[in-house]
Image (cartoon, rainbow, N blue to C red):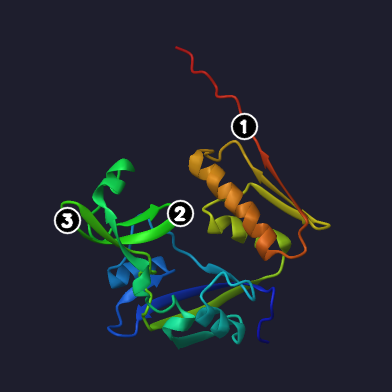
Amino acid sequence: MPFTNGDFVTIDYTARRASDKSIVYTTMEKRAKEEGVFEEEGRYGPQLIVIGKNNAIKGVEDAVKGMTVSQQKTVEIEPKDAFGERSEDLVRVMKLSDFRERDINPVPGMRVNIDGTAVTVKSVNSARVVVDANHPLAGEKLVYDITVVKKLDSEKEKVDSIAEMYALKPDEAQSERAAVKVVFGDKVNKDADYFINKSAMVSAIFRLMDDVKNVSVEERYAREEKKEK
């Protein structure tokens, strides 16, 4: 049976450029290694899609919506249903000093965040930097090989999977009467990235789970044992 709006679905996929068949990204570590595109810092594993919530590109969501668990499909996705058409209005020239003030040494190909906008450095000379705010895949027709892995039914699975989107792994996740409780134990490294990702996770729970009215996050800490000299 095809999926409907609100369904939580995990998929594996490999995305390629239609022009030269080069791999853009794959969720599968083994495939990445076989194709020579493996990244040590990359995150691999099935990706969550919530039907109707636009947390994946339109072409992928449209394809998955008509699939069933364990089904495989290859789809060709036009730019308008992928990462959009290129716009030359998003290419601009900045002063090199603007980067120096931000402690950034720009080089061509670098992705940086400028005033909340992700840009790609296209060229650098003695005083000017050309940056492009188009998505790196804007204007590209893409081919996706998609496999539907699982439909998530329990509220705990849904919360765990949202947390995983932000590189978080709760010790406990509970949902009852429109309230979600997430617990991070004392073994979780609560660094700056953790607090940023925790906030993003809470926002995503509200955005993706329509019935949730309240989210609480419990953090547990343990006194560090002093080693005797």
Can residue 159 be seen here? The reply is no
Q: Residue furthest left?
A: 126
In the image, residue 77 above or below residue 164: below
Residue at image location 60% in from the left, 80% down from the top? 69
In front: 124, or 155? 124
Say which amino acid is labelled 2. Gly
User: Which residue matches tag 2?
Assistant: 116
Between the residue at mark 1 and the residue at mark 3, the CA separation in whole angstroms equals 50 Å
Relative placement, left or right, of 88 versus 3 is left
In front: 127, or 73? 127
| Picture coordinates of residue 223, whole percent (x, y) | 59, 24
What label sits on residue 156 in the rendered view?
A: none
Residue at image location 49% in from the left, 73% down from the top? 12
Can residue 78 be seen here? The reply is yes
Relative placement, left or right, of 105 versus 196 is left
Residue at image location 36% in from the left, 80% down from the top? 140
What label sits on residue 125 in the rendered view?
A: 3
Q: In which quarter of the image is residue 177?
A: bottom right
Q: Which residue lies furthest to the top in this view?
A: 229
Name the N-terminal-most of marks 2 and 1: 2
Name the N-terminal-most of marks 2 and 3: 2
Name the N-terminal-most of marks 1 and 3: 3
User: Which residue matches tag 1?
Assistant: 221
Say which amino acid is labelled 1. Tyr
Q: Nearer the viewer, mark 2 or mark 1?
A: 2
In front: 91, or 54? 91
Q: In which quarter of the image is residue 136?
A: bottom left
Relative placement, left or right, of 146 versus 105 is right
Category of crowding for the residue at label 2, using alpha-carbon neighbours closer than 10 angstroms: few (below 14), some (14–19), many (at least 20): few
Q: Quadrant of the C terminus?
A: top left
